[in-house]
Image: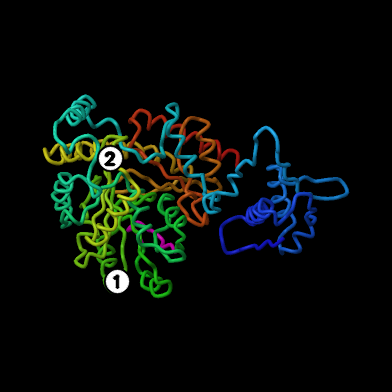
Amino acid sequence: MNIRVNHTIKTPIYRQIATQMRNQIFSGEIGSGSTLPSERAMAQMLGVHRNTVVRAYSELKDEALIESRQGVGYVVMLPAIEKTGGRGKRVHWESQIREKYLDMQMTFDDLFQRFSNENIISLGSGIATTEIYDKEKVAADLAGLLTAEGRNQYFYSPYQGDKNLRQKLISFLSTKGVKATLGEIQILTETNQALDFIVTLLLKQGEVVLMEEPVSPDVYRTVELAGGKIITVPVDRDGMQCHKLEELIQLHHPRFLYVNSSFHDPTGAILSMERRKRIIEISNRYRLAVIEEDAASELVYSGAKFLPIKAYDTLNNVIYIYSFSLTFMPGLSLAFVVADQTLIERLSYLVSVRLVSSDWLAQKLIARYLGDGSYYQVLTKFRENYALKQELICRKLDQMKIMGVEYERPRGGVYIWCKLPEGIDSKKLVDAAYQKGISILPGYVFYPMKNGGRDYIRLNYSYESSERLLLGMDILKDTIRKELAHKK
């Protein structure tokens, strides 16, 4: 039996021990009927605490792979092979699945799935409101697309995306100061898919990626699953702090830098103009690729709207990702990537390998709305709707300041990053709030190493109606008050 413990990875030690023993049992290296070392002896062999071995053995016992016998200890007990009735060995799926996928953190996904419960008021889901688009008009437009004649109909689009849509996006990008050609745009379904494809193209096992902290779990998990090493850069009210970027680049030689430039998830910060230009300078000096995610940039409620980093990118070092997730009908998701044509060609090839077709219907619909100008009209309505909801949320938060709640009001976007009163743990608060009918996200899920954010929560106000948001904030206030009372 050969068990090795790695203290440098995030996988719990007990899980490492149990996984290796499980694999050796199924491979026959540890035979059925074998007696395992005692908990104390195994702990001494591996240089770990006895309780760690107890947890590992307990996991194997729960899987009926070992049992404890009085006076003997732990014994391997693989079930005997059934030789009659045509039965054989059942696949042991946990030993078949790659370990990094077994160890995936499910916390964020479980919390986000609470959104699907209609009885729960969602203050956590970054999804567009359904209050803007006229549903009957959208239905009529969809019907018109489905019944239109032509060989380009019926659900198949070129792997790079619908040409007509890409042409409309060139005009849309010009309003943001970004120049692009048809060959520099790739259509995809959502930001997560775009990031996954880009990481697949660029990142090799063990390479470093620089990113903000806090940061969306969807971002850092994509890098982790690709085998990348994450180095984080703090965020303040002006976005990613750039003063140590060059030092980190010289020290770690990162593959790329990821930055959420406008109304950052989760803090709501907007990267200052000075820092946008600084990132371009650093990118050009070190030939460093930059991935800019910019989905909330149109949602400005006060002050100037900044041009994206991509607008200053004269050398084509920036990969720009934009999504319509916050300004289109929920369920009709669409995103696109703007980058050097060589990268887009390889990205399109990867799409052709992984997808039979892209979302034809959403592409046609957005192309129509961009073409007739109606998308620009609804953008104004989205801003008005979200700005009103932000005002309502902030009024409620102001009432909670006396309890110790702190926050900075963003100039736009859909997120507010709230510091909880001293002594309140966000995980416990989130669970208590859910029992009372609201879903929120705890701050620690936005920290890749889970080393921060326990005293923060992220609030989102895009999806729910004003009435439900006000009710949800009253529930949150009451929940915080009761948590504080328990601390006394």
Query: Is the Cβ of the residue at disc 1 closer than 8 Å to that at disc 2?
Result: no
Indicate the secondary structure of the residue bearing disc 2.
Answer: loop
Give the alpha-carbon distance from disc 1 to disc 2, as whole Å.
34 Å
Residue found 52% across the figure and 37% down from its top? 481
Q: Quadrant of residue 390?
A: top left
Q: Earlier in the sequence, mark 1 or mark 2?
A: 1
Q: Position of residue 275 (x, y in %)?
A: 29, 64
Residue found 11% across the figure and 38% down from its top? 372
Q: Main secondary structure of the magenta part?
A: strand
Q: Which residue is mark 1?
A: 287
Residue 292 colored magenta? no
Q: Amino acid at mark 2?
A: Asp
The magenta-colored residue range is 231-240
Camera-nearest label, 1 or 2 = 2
Determine the residue located farthest toward the left in the rendered image: 372
**Vertical relation: 163 (above or below) 241:** above
Indicate the secondary structure of the residue bearing disc 1.
Answer: loop
Instruction: Report whether 445 appears left or right of 287.
Output: right
Q: How is the image coloured?
A: rainbow
The tag on residue 413 is none
Q: Nearer the viewer, residue 221 or 236?
A: 221
**Vertical relation: 109 (above or below) 319:** above
Q: Quadrant of the C terminus?
A: top right
Q: Amino acid at mark 1?
A: Arg
Q: Position of residue 391 (x, y in %)?
A: 31, 39
Q: Which residue is mark 2?
A: 359
